[in-house]
């Protein structure tokens, strides 16, 4: 039997192969996803794009495959330069798998103050979406921090576990954004484990926050909301008391709940959750300048999520209206900026504003190249623009398509 390269196939081809493997008709698949048979036919012949994460996840669940099988993630490169970040994944995986074994670090473990500085750098790389550099640095950092948890005692040991939990959070960011869903799930579980050892209740809530993305892949919307509500309940007393860490964590959890509700197509709940997050930011006031637990709970992220929620609800006009008034501060972290430009581009594309959508995709790729080149919705948006290309932006979108290995 001859096998083709899934990454070189169209999305429609991958959907058709998965459907035939299940031995079901287009009509039966349509019934399972609540669509018409003509819609499935359009998807399979690539005349209808799969232009939302919720749609891909719903179709994947009906076909009993992981969404990555339909999107062909992760997107590996053909040269060392193009494969940046991906080549470090096996060693990150190894470090995550040996989390509860004896340390293998053969050097001197740095003082906690120096390890904290190393974690600050890892967080900065994550915020700036510099995943290749972060991926290359993580294996040694994870190994040394694991050794630190064996070396230090008492409160210092708790601090070491807290730093390790943050390093696992960085590993989750790398693996998730580069397309390694299984490894992201492992990293999330490691965050939860290290948080329990540290005794920090807020890091436990952050682990719940991270877990939600894996529940999204199986369209487990109600389960995701239940996990988030449970995490909110765990910090409710501190939230009521106005502790800044609790306000930031609560706000971040509500923003994730808002996106979850939007993907569930529950508009009222999505906007209600968005308002709850905004209330937390208002209560934070000037303290929102501190990026507690790397959740970016601030007014800019509230505004960005307003666009994202509209996009997840499939409301292009509202996404554009909200996007037109968003003003991003110059110091906003690159990963949030990249996501925003991508979401805004998708709204513009749905509204027929193709040249403006192209410009937003270019801005997204400029500020967060690895994030955007490895994002399935960016890939789909570029493919759509290539299909609809016009003279005014033809060369620009083709150059973007080449960089994303679409052409």
Image (cartoon, rainbow, N blue to C red):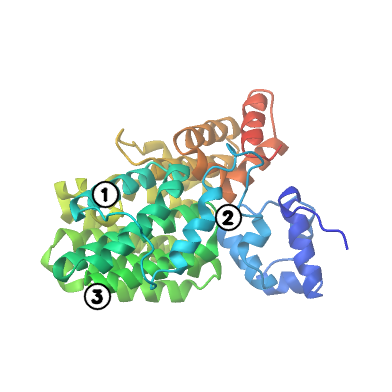
Which is nearer the eye, 228 or 6?
Answer: 6
What label does residue 234 carry, if any? 3
Residue 264 in sight from this viewpoint:
no
Q: Residue furthest left?
A: 241
Residue 263 location, x and y as percent?
A: 50, 63
Relative to 27, residue 382 above or below: above
Residue plotted at (79% across, 60% down): 41
* Residue 224 in picture, x, y percent from top left: 43, 72
Residue at image coords 38%, 61%: 256
Q: Nearer the viewer, residue 160 or 214?
A: 160
Local crowd size for mark 2, using a 10 Å CA cut-off: few (<14), some (14–19), many (≥20): some
Q: Is residue 13 visible?
A: yes
Residue under pointer 2: 52
| Quadrant of the rendering where the C terminus is positioned | top right
Residue under label 1, please give it: 298
Mark earlier in primary sequence (2, 3)? 2
Cα–Cα span, label 2 and label 3: 32 Å
Q: Nearer the viewer, residue 327 or 104?
A: 104
């Amino acid at each position: 039997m001859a096998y083709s390269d899934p990454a070189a196939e169209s999305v429609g081809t991958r959907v058709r192969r998965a459907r035939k493997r299940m031995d079901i008709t287009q009509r039966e698949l349509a019934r399972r996803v609540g669509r018409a048979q003509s819609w499935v036919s359009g998807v399979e012949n690539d005349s209808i794009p799969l232009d939302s994460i919720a749609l891909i996840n719903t179709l994947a669940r009906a076909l009993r495959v992981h969404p990555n099988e339909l999107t062909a993630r992760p997107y590996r490169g053909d040269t060392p330069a193009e494969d940046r970040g991906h080549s470090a994944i096996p060693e990150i995986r190894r470090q995550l798998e040996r989390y509860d074994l004896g340390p293998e670090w053969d050097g001197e473990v740095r003082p906690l103050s120096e390890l904290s500085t190393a974690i600050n750098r890892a967080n900065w790389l994550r915020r700036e979406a510099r995943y290749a550099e972060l991926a290359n640095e993580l294996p040694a950092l994870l190994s040394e921090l694991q050794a630190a948890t064996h070396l230090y005692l008492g409160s210092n040991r708790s601090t070491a576990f807290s730093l390790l939990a943050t390093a696992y959070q960085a590993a989750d960011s790398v693996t998730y954004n580069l397309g390694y869903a299984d490894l992201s799930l492992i990293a999330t579980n490691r965050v939860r484990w290290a948080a329990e050892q540290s005794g920090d209740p807020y890091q436990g809530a952050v682990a719940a926050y991270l877990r939600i993305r894996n529940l999204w892949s199986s369209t487990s919307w109600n389960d995701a909301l239940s996990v988030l509500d449970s995490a909110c309940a765990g910090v409710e007393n501190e939230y009521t008391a106005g502790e800044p860490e609790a306000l930031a964590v609560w706000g971040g959890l509500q923003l994730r709940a808002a996106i979850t509700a939007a993907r569930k197509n529950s508009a009222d709940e999505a906007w209600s959750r968005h308002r709850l997050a905004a209330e937390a930011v208002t209560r934070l006031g000037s303290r929102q300048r501190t990026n507690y637990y790397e959740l970016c709970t601030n007014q800019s992220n509230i505004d960005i999520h307003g666009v994202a929620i509209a996009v997840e609800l499939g409301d292009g006009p509202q996404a554009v209206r909200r996007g037109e008034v968003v003003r991003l501060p110059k110091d906003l972290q690159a990963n949030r900026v990249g996501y925003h430009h991508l979401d805004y581009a998708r709204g513009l594309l749905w509204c027929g504003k193709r040249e403006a959508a192209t410009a937003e995709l270019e801005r997204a790729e400029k500020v967060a190249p690895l994030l955007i080149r490895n994002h399935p919705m960016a890939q789909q948006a570029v493919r759509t623009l290539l299909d609809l290309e016009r003279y005014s932006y033809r060369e620009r979108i083709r150059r973007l398509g080449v960089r994303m290995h679409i052409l």
